[in-house]
Image: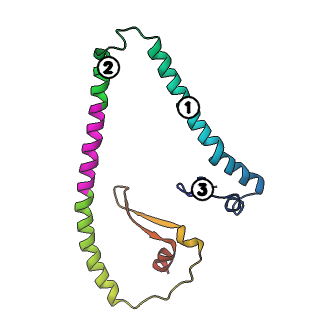
Amino acid sequence: MTFPIIDVSKQSVAEFESQCTRSRAWQFVAWYRVVRPLLVFGIWFLAVRYIRWCLEHATPEEVSLEAFVPIIIGVAAVSATLIVWTIARQIDLFHSGRLRRMNDGARAADEAAAPPQAELPVTAAAGRCLVAYHDDDGMISHVVSMPEYARQTA
């Protein structure tokens, strides 16, 4: 059973019941709203307690600035790499997006000359379903709603 990645924790029991039994729906709601958040909170709580215990039982040499400098430099290097990578990717997407918009303009002119297609009936739930198109690199090139996708395939 698959659920939307973003909305799953906000679904009600009735929404889960449309896809499974009532008891299974209650299990999903309990997992996504109670058990999973408590599990995440518990893991963070235990991590904080462990770090506190380590710092309380460390020798003065282990908590000196000289001991933390290599760690700080490593974290700064990884952060700088991620920032540069993100900026470079955004610049690349900007340039490829401009090229795609130029191609879309030519494609829109071709579609304007084609006869219009008949409108398909649209259900209320279909508006939340999306279809993602991918380019050759595996990145999402564009996303369309399910009614629009149905019109394109008809």
Quick one: label 1 or label 2, which is nearer the N terminus? Answer: 1
Q: Is residue 103 above or below residue 78?
A: below
Question: Closest to the observer: 4 or 13?
Answer: 13
Identify residue type, mark 2. Answer: Phe
The part of the chain drawn in magenta is 76-92
Q: Is residue 26 above or below residue 40?
A: below
**The stretch drawn in magenta includes residue 113:** no
Q: Which mark is residue 68?
A: 2
Residue 59 placement (x, y as % from top left): 40, 8
Residue 67, quarter of picture: top left
Tag 3: Cα neighbours inside 10 Å, few (<14), some, or many (≥20)?
few
Q: Main secondary structure of the magenta part?
A: helix
Q: Is residue 69 above or below residue 112?
A: above
Q: Which mark is residue 43?
A: 1
Identify residue type, mark 3. Answer: Lys
Residue 112 placement (x, y as % from top left): 33, 87
Q: Secondary structure at mark 2?
A: helix
* Residues at marks 2 and 3, CA–CA distance in whole angstroms: 42 Å
For mark 3, what is the residue? Answer: 10
Q: How is the image coloured?
A: rainbow
Residue in view at x 48 percent, y 71 percent = 145
Identify residue type, mark 1. Answer: Ile
